[in-house]
Image (spheres, helix red, strand yellow):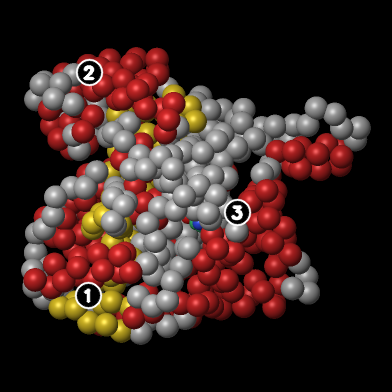
Amino acid sequence: MDITKMTALALGKKIRQKEISVREAVLASQEKIKEQEESLHCYITLNTEAALLQADKVQKLIDNKSLTGPLAGVPVAIKDNICTKDILTTCASKILSNFIPPYSAEAYINLERQGAILLGKTNMDEFAMGSTTETSAFGITKNPHDTSRVPGGSSGGSCAAVAADECFYALGSDTGGSIRQPSSFCGVTGIKPTYGTVSRYGLVAYGSSLDQIGPIAKDVTDCAVILEAISSYDPKDSTSVKRDSYDFTAGLVNDVKGLKIGLPKDYFGEGLDSQVSESILAAAKELEAKGAILEEFDLGLVDYAIPAYYTIASAEASSNLARFDGVKYGYRTEDADELHHMYKKSRSEGFGPEVKRRIMLGSFVLSSGYYDAYYLKALRTKALIKQAFDKAFDRYDIILGPAAPTTAPKFGELVSDPIKMYLSDIYTISTNLAGLPGISVPCGKDHEGLPIGVQMLAKCFDEKTLIRAAYTYEQTRERV
Ligand code: GLN
């Protein structure tokens, strides 16, 4: 039996039943990584020896019944913008290429408490800016389904690692689709929770009002359990929300009778690949056959989501990334003759082209004279988008559509044309602008065998219904 093909939960169970030891599970993952990494490059940093030490420690705690949870002893991969104490956290950038955080992100601490074993830190677009993982300063990650294609981004390393069985599950971050889009391209399942559900403490900030950490796994059940494990109210994050319930696994119910599902007509128009469209509509029909009520509707404002998102995300990024100046963190230029010169050179040499583009765009839209014309207008648009979703959720429990307009493109296709790359985020970014929870679930493959993901959205704090719809859909088909 190939252990690495198991879901996180199935492995957790075998570990608790003493059929597989934690060390065996870690070694199996490490073997898979060794076999495939040269070609796929899912990881930036491997935690090889420390993972084995951690495995022995966790095994003892499982043996003496101190650790009894479903994820105890299960190996995980973490996106490299989530801080892990004493372990390199680069954000796939040159400027943080030597950054070893003195603390861990709250979401990761929550996993450690459950007995997770860290296999390594995964590749991503630099500072999570991108849709293909090609903007990484550490080289590209390849899509395990076709190595001439991108895994998506920015959590491309995490999604490829799950798809290639190089970990049992992973954490990613989603500012405008970075969990859902690569999940769709890699044929895995990923959830972006309601804004405020998972603490952002220790997540290196990109667009603070949009960023959320979320699970990437082999199925909906794993995702629900992992989300439950990482979610918590955290006073260290001022946007953390104390929720009434964190019982996401209560949504694992195979029943959608009477559930109202809205299909936004605006999501099925020009630009959507016909095979993707067919596959998404077939998924909707499956849910209808199980008793859900389907209806098409006009969501509206879709054309405004991309400009609003890139204005807000870049504005926040330009402010968040101001702290990387060669003084306190990371890379500092070798030769600078005075302080100002040192800042300028460190930043010029330390940031890649996509990050610089965002910093310039963000500084521009925040500058006096342009603030009202761009930034404030984008914030107003964001409020209108939120209202449009609120109105839709008065009528529907779930909104269903594609996660991405196409399947995984070839290398170079998107990254060479920034506008084309930004436009490819059309179906995911408004979710973040409205703070909603969303999931991408595999729903088929195109003629070339490339995975397609169906995206479902629910109203804020209703992950339970989201998980219920996704779980019910998943029961209708085999894992791809
Ligand atoms: N592709 C989007 C961007 O580049 C989303 C990235 C993300 O969700 N981190 O901003």
Q: Viewer-nearest of labels 3 and 1?
A: 3
Residue under circle 1?
A: 261
Q: Is residue 212 left or right of residue 444?
A: right
Q: Viewer-nearest of labels 3 and 2?
A: 3
Decide which of 132, 383 is in the foreground and name it: 132
- Residue type pointed to by label 1: Ile
Using the image, tell me which numbered label, if any, was put on residue 416: 3
Quick check: is the Cβ at mark 1 less than 8 Å away from ligand 1? no
Residue under circle 2?
A: 24
Q: Residue at x 35, y 23 (%)?
A: 35
Q: Label 2, secondary structure: give it.
A: helix
- Residue type pointed to by label 2: Glu
Decide which of 383, 289 is in the foreground and name it: 289
Q: Residue at x 35, y 39 (%)?
A: 144
- For label 2, the crowd category at 10 Å Cα-Cα, with few meaning under 14, some 14 to 19 and many 20 or more, is some
- The location of residue 256, given as percent across then percent down, is 12, 68
Decide which of 437, 147 is in the foreground and name it: 147
Decide which of 468, 265 is in the foreground and name it: 265
Position of 313 relative to 400 (above/below)? above
Name the quadrant containing residue 30.
top left
